[in-house]
Each structure stands twice: as C-alpha cells, then as structure tokens.
Image: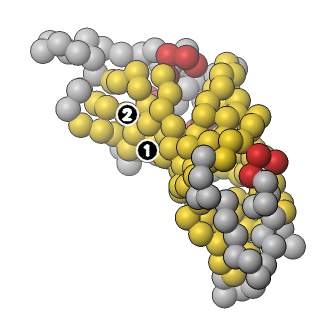
Amino acid sequence: MTAPATTDLSGDYALDVTHTRLGFTARHAMVTKVRGSFEQFEGAAHLDFEDPTKSTATVTFQIASINTGQPQRDDHLRTNDFFDAPTFPVGTFVSTSVVKKSDEEFEMTGDLTLKDTTKPVTITWEHTGTARDPFGNFRAGFEGRATISRKDWGIEYNAVLETGGVLISDKINLEFDVSAVKNA
C-alpha cells in the first residue's frame, strides 16, 4: 500500500457501507453468471501503509440481506438449501495475515464463517487510491477478489442438468469494492 508522502494514512478505518460492495458471482446452468451481494454489513480495519503485514480487517454481514436482483431466488438462498439465514443470520470474515505482493497488491488471509463453519480464505487486494473527500475525511479504496468452493461451508444444493453439468457452480467468485474512512 503506497500512501501519499504528505499524509500518514495509517490508522483505524470503518467501511463506508454506502460506497462498498460485498459481491459474488456463481455460474448458473453452466452458461451464464448470477451476480449478487450482501446489502447489510459493517466492517473495520487497521491499515498500516508503512508495513501492510500489520494491517487487519473484520467484516460482519447479514445473510438475510442477500440480493441477486430476483426476489424468489433471494428467498431460496435464505433457506436451508443454501445459507439457512434463520438459523445462521450472520457471516463474518476476520483477517489472520497479510502478505505484500507489490506496492499496490497484497493478499489477506482470514477466517470466513458461514453456517457455523469457519474456513480460511485468501483475498487478493489492489489498493486503488487514497484521498481526502469534500467533508475532510481520509479515504482508502481497495478492490478484492477470491474464489471459494461453496461446498466447504456445507452449501451443496444443486440439480443435474439434462444436457450434463449442474445448475449451480460449486466455484463462487467473491468480489469486493471497498471504500474505508479513517476514524477521527
């Protein structure tokens, strides 16, 4: 993470939920992608621009806030076939380590908990910039991506297609667009 030399942006941050997206894509019927996101979440990070390995992050998201743009599908995703939102209403990510790959790219590994199952996930992050917004807040931007197997969290619902293959891919691509605001 390279920060402007004139300002020390290292410190504690909160996710700006109105300018952050916690998204995913899944292959549907082996021919197209379904995109979705979690709409209700909160998160915090400690960013160390001098030594990114000292950075940490935590995110909590409400499973019932899943949104793929199709209400019937979203209702099905909330059931025990997928996330079982009534029983497991919250998902979490808590970082465990950060490795710097270049001045603008790093990998953050952490524990992702879904349906009471915790597994490690490594997210590749690109630092997209820092700025002082019109309200005087320091902001840091990041884009992240990871690929997971939904079966690792017990999310195994599927249907075999007549033409071969399955209705829903096991591989899920996670996509994050983050705007974090430095705490005063």
> Residue beneath label 2, please?
26
Q: Which amino acid does label 1 sit on?
A: Gly
Q: Where is residue 162 in the image (x, y as percent from the top left)?
A: 14, 12
In the rendered view, tell whether residue 35 sits above or below residue 12.
Answer: above
In the picture provided, is 41 more to the left or to the right than 27? right
Seen at 87% across and 73% down, the residue is 184
Seen at 81% across and 64% down, the residue is 10
- Judging from the image, what secondary structure is the residue with disc 2 in? strand
Seen at 67% across and 65% down, the residue is 2
User: Can residue 109 be seen in this snapshot?
Assistant: yes
Q: Residue 134 falls in which quadrant of the image?
A: bottom right
> Residue beneath label 1, please?
36
- Specify the farthest residue to the right: 184
Q: Do the residues labelled 1 and 2 touch (CB within 8 Å)?
A: yes
In the rendered view, tell whether residue 126 sits above or below residue 165.
Answer: below
41, 76: nearer the viewer? 41
User: Can residue 61 be seen in this snapshot?
Assistant: no
Q: Of tags 1 and 2, which is closer to the observer?
A: 2
- Specify the farthest residue to the front: 102
CA distance separating discs 1 and 2: 9 Å
